[in-house]
Image (cartoon, rainbow, N blue to C red):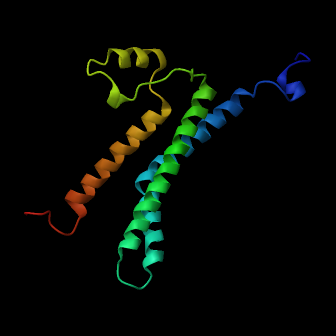
Amino acid sequence: MSQGSPSNTGQGKPSVRFLRLRRILILIATTLIAINIWTGAPIAALWIGSRVVGQRALSMIAVFVVVASLAVLLGAMALALTWLNARYDQLIGRPTGERRTPPWLRSMRAEEAELLRKKHGTTALEMIVVANTVTAVIALEIWFFFFARSPPPGA
């Protein structure tokens, strides 16, 4: 080994194993936050609202507390996902200086989106959130059609 190698000095670039571990931890955190957007945040907001109601009847203040706490929790989770996505992109070397157009603002012809996708690929955050959303919708449909006790309206 040379004298200036990172293993001798303890400085320099982190090892490949450490970078891989950091990427995996970021992906796990992203997945957990994405799941909690559907599950943890609504449950926590209802719990906070239940503390406001206590033993009394439901009030508009309690409803407002539930909505406000849900908005705060979802905002915090969205910021956390954005931060984790930026850290992950940094670790894999994805350029961060370019401004990306959100999918809902892109042209229907999608030439720009296709060029961007070919150049940078799909981000890990996009794949995790899409997989999480599809899983949540399928789970909701399975529950609604097979396990919900009351019949659907009009049935």
Residue that sits furthest to the bottom in the current view: 55
Residue 31 x %, y %: 50, 44
Residue 31 appearing in the image = yes
Q: Is residue 125 above or below residue 113?
A: below
In this view of the protein, which residue sits in the foreground, 151 or 52? Answer: 52
Residue that sits furthest to the right in the current view: 3
Tell me the residue at 70%/27% (across/down).
Answer: 16
Residue 36 appearing in the image = no
In this view of the protein, which residue sits in the foreground, 60 or 20? Answer: 60
Tell me the residue at 31%/52% (across/down).
Answer: 139
Q: Is residue 91 above or below residue 79?
A: above
Quadrant housing the N terminus? top right
Quadrant of res 89? top right
Tell me the residue at 44%/75% (across/down).
Answer: 50
Residue 150 x %, y %: 18, 69
Quadrant housing the C terminus? bottom left
Quadrant of res 62? bottom left
Residue that sits furthest to the left in the current view: 154
Quadrant of res 101? top left
Residue 22 x %, y %: 65, 36
Residue 55 x %, y %: 42, 85
Q: Is residue 55 above or below residue 20?
A: below
Q: Is residue 58 above or below residue 89?
A: below
Counting the numbered discs, the total is 0
